[in-house]
Image (tube, grey):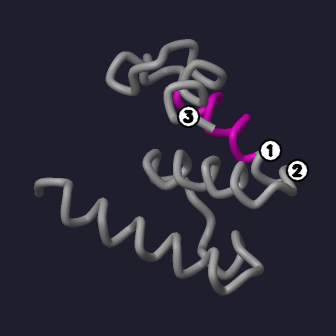
Amino acid sequence: MEMQDLLQRYFGTRDLAEVDPVAVPAGTDRIKVDFGLERDRGRRFALWTLLYMLDAAPDLDVAFEDPADREAARNLMDLLAVATPD
């Protein structure tokens, strides 16, 4: 899954900066529903990543059954923390 494709699907644009703030809650709710239904690990991780970027991701122990997936999510969080200026 490409992040731009997810943004297009849930928010109608491929650029997160262009998302109307009014549309964020409804799009986030749709992502949460799809995340809960998704069984493919890769797709599930992509949806969790988008939720994380929107500050709406579930806790890792709730989101991922597999310890390797939780560790991958922690690594992503660390990378984003370093890449994101305060």
Separation (CA) of disc 2 from disc 1: 6 Å
Residue identified by numbered label 3: 2
| Classed neighbour count for the residue bearing mark 3: other residues with Cα under 10 Å, few (<14), some (14–19), many (≥20) | few
- Name the kind of residue labelled 2 in the image: Leu
Q: Which mark is first along the chain, 3 or 1? A: 3
C-alpha distance separating marks 2 and 3: 19 Å
Which amino acid type is marked by label 3? Answer: Glu
Give, as a single range, the part of the protein colored magenta. Answer: 24-32
Tell me the residue at 60%/73% (across/down). Answer: 59
Picture coordinates of residue 82, whole percent (x, y): 19, 65
Residue for point 53% across, 53% down: 49
**Numbered mark located on residue 37 in the image:** 2
| Residue type marked 1 | Val
Residue closer to the observer: 19 or 77:
77
Where 78 sits versus 56, above or below?
below
Main secondary structure type of the part rendered in magenta: helix
Specify whether 62 is left or right of 14: right
Residue 32, given in percent of the width and then of the height, sits at: 72, 47
At a point 75% along the width and 60% down the height, the residue shown is 41
Asked if the residue under mark 3 is in contact with the one under mark 1, i.e. CB atoms within 8 Å, the reply is: no
Most foreground residue, 37 or 24: 37
In this rendering, the label closer to the viewer, 1 or 3: 3
